[in-house]
Image (cartoon, grey):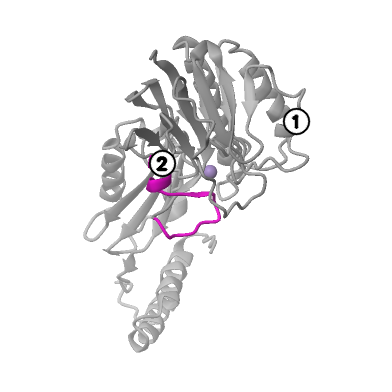
Amino acid sequence: MESISILHCADLHLGASFSSLPPGVATERSNDLLRVFTKIIELCDSRKIQLLLIAGDLFDTIHVPEALTDMARNAFESIPSTFVAIAPGNHDPAVFDSLYRMKDKWPKNVYVFTNGLSYVDLPAMKVRLWGAGFTNIYQDKPISLVSKFTDTDLLNICVMHSELVSTGTSSAYNPITMAMIEESSMDYIALGHIHKRSEIYQVGSVFYAYPGSPEGLGFDEKGERGVYIGEVSRGFCDMHFCALNKRSYMDVHVDATGLQREEIIKQIRNMLRLDKVRAVDNLIRVYLTGTVTEDSYVSPEYATSVFSDVFYLALFDQTELSAQSDSSGHSFTLRNIYIRKMQEIINQKPDDEATKLALKLGLRAFSEKVIYKK
Ligand SMILES: [Mn+2]
């Protein structure tokens, strides 16, 4: 049996708004999603991919702006020798007025699965292409992949948005079990929904995988991200991970105890350099811990200005402040009285984080303008 070339992707979430990020950063992230989509289309073209499998959540929402669907349509039209199969997911289900149901919307090399399990034959590739689509945001009934129409003379490929669960476990997102996969008689099952990439697994004679989201959507989606690309035949699967993400999410932890301000900054810089990709392109959260003096204190605003070359850096200050009294000899300065009063309260309630924060912010207010955002 001849092999076919496949690019398997999922969970692009085109149109996602990244509302937890500052507006300019969020817009750029939305554009990154478009860029990763374009890279996928270019790969299909340059690698002469026969089958592009999109396993759900291509779009972030059910109803997306027309400009975005037009962009996707034109992109698919630009790769006429690639057959594109879309299985709508829980974010972009094929509801009654879904763009996926608009017959004239999509070029003829695109097929959308808008029902339970069904198939379309691709005789030139000797493929029977199976798939199922979400028609609602929830889909708790498992879809059996066992069918009397499975044709063993053809390569049986399946694309579906589905949550892999252990037997006996339920899920609102089209649950599938290893047993169901093994019984399916498919040659390859292209899954979507889990944003963390899986390896290419084999159970019985069936290969299956989750490629994960090709561009992370938040700090819970760290590391390299991309798609699976390669060749599949009967009992043979040579699919490789191909990283495509423009930016990564990183968490950096620095203990600032005993360090001067410049040393803290230097330490953060060093930790950014450990990343393989250009860290300045990344989205970084810095967690600062330990005990600092006022002189060495790094405020979130200061960090943002020092690391203005980084695409997005947010500092989370979790340090304890060791407050130093004025050494002017005048113990009755307003500042010294403030420190003494605050420390009395802290000593009474050592676990009260709000008071510690008040001391930190209050002391800064003696020397600079403090903007506090909770
Ligand atoms: Mn998703």
Point out which mark residue 168 bears: none
**Could you say which is closer to the camera, residue 144 or residue 307?**
144
Tell me: 347 left or right of 177.
left
Q: Which quadrant would residue 330 be assigned to in this image?
A: bottom left
Q: Residues within 10 Å of mark 2 (few under 14, many from 20)?
A: some
| Residue 336 on the magenta span | no
User: In the rendering, at what x and y percent does residue 325 appear?
Assistant: 32, 74
Can you tell which mark lies on residue 183? 2
Amino acid type shown at disc 1: Glu
Q: Relative to residue 16, is residue 128 depicted above or below?
A: above
Residue at (43, 71) in percent of width and height: 357
**Which percent across, then down, holds residue 113?**
63, 33
Residue farthest to the left? 258
Nearer to us in this view, 183 or 201: 183
Considering every residue shown, the one lying at the far bottom of the view is 348
Name the image quarter holding residue 300. Answer: bottom left
Q: In what element is the residue under mark 1?
A: helix
Label 1 belongs to which residue?
66
Which residue: 57% across, 26% down? 85
Q: For this rendering, which residue is in front, 131 or 359?
A: 131
Give the quarter of the figure containing the N terminus: top left
Work out whether residue 180 can be spotted.
yes
Sequence-earlier tag: 1 or 2: 1
Q: Quadrant of residue 195?
A: top left
In the figure, is residue 190 to the left or right of 298?
Answer: right
